[in-house]
Image (cartoon, rainbow, N blue to C red):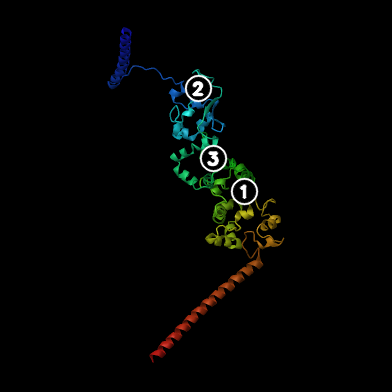
Amino acid sequence: MKKNVALIILICFLALGVFGQQTSVVFAASAGQDPAPTATPDTSNPHRAGECLGCHGLPGMKGRTANDEIVSLYIQPAEHEVNFHTQAGVGCKFCHLDQGEYPHASSSFATCSVCHGMNGEKVDKTAELIFTLPYQDPREFTLSFNDACSQCHQEKYDQVAESVHTRLAEAGNKYAPMCVDCHGAHAISEANRQTQSAICKKCHEGEYNQYKDSVHGAALEDEANPDVPTCGGCHGSHAVKGPSNTDFRQIAATEICGKCHSDPAVMEKYGISTDVMGTYLEDVHGKTNIMGRVNRLDEVKATCYDCHGVHNILSPSNPYSSVYPSNLQATCAQCHQNAGIQFPAAWLSHKKPELATMPLLYAVNNYSLAVVVIVLLLAGLWVILDLRRANAVQVYKNEQGQE
């Protein structure tokens, strides 16, 4: 009994001592005095320091998904430093909502024995530290963080919802590109003209290889040319569109090409005529294209890339170009199966008939135009005279009726 009383008294004294120390600190602070120095936090302990890289900066940090695949949970300090979110003061917890505190909300992340051993002893930090992840596979793990982007980038996030990539995801393709696939997870930097094609290359390597050898891609890769189109310039960066969109052929293709090839300031640099869009819209291909926009968006009409290529566009002077004179018959034969060797001669190569270069065609065109104008004038005159005659007849009848 005496031992119990002594133990109780000892506990009371200890409690009073702690309470007294805290009270003195509060009174000292309220009186404007410096409180008594306290013990320095143990910053070597990552749990107390609150530094994510204290654990995730270990190269052996890994996770195992439900299908027994291993993913790295290691974040290289260099990746963390170049992340423009980090530079702006946005920390890990802002994106990793479920991992804001330790142990993490997903308790299976915090398997103490992985780092401390079964008996609580510390293990070698250079060894593999494999945690159990609450995800079916690595892709599910990656996608779990994608929605965090909408916290700051809602406008871009909404644009992605309209893209062909999102349609693929909704159709069940879990590997359809999402924010993290294009921008990265930790070494995030703002995309620009030079990096855009490299991002798309990760999924579209075949298209990229054609593009980098094309007249556009070569100028971008070798010269950093600011005028040539990039992947995003044609397809869009977030609201990505492609040939699977019904209006891409009839509307987007001509507008994309026309945006640059109708700009005198840009075309003058390269000695390219700005008449290409106008001459296209005036010929049979362009006219049927315009008509198709109204009711037949799904019909195939010859657009710019049907003749010039899609990603593999080359200069018309390049022997490998699809519009090089010796290759034109094969190009036309894609639609006109019976096209003979003389068939391409009917195409004016985006040139307007002029007296100096095509005198006969120029004369025929102007003669036809004159005939059409004269016929319309005569028809209009005939209508006017007929109306006057009809009016005179009606007046005469009225006068006769009055008599």
**Closer to the eye: label 3 or 2:** 2
Residue 191, labelled with which disc?
Answer: none
* Mark 3 or mark 2: whose residue is earlier in sequence: 2
Q: Tell me the residue that label 2 is attached to.
A: 113
Question: Would residue 331 be visible to someone looking at this image?
Answer: yes
Quadrant position of the N terminus in the picture: top left
Q: Considering depth in this image, is 83 or 74 the residue closer to the camera?
A: 74
Q: Position of residue 401 (x, y in %)?
A: 40, 90
From what the image shows, is residue 194 above or below residue 261? above
Horizontal side of 193 relative to 346 (left or right) equals left
For label 2, the SS is helix
- Residue at (45%, 83%) from the top-left corner? 391
Q: Considering depth in this image, is 60 or 44 the residue closer to the camera?
A: 60
Residue 182, labelled with which disc?
Answer: 3
Quadrant location of residue 362? bottom right
Using a 10 Å C-alpha cutoff, classify the residue at mark 1 as few (fewer than 14 neighbours), some (14 to 19) or many (20 or more).
many
**Closer to the eye: label 1 or 3:** 3
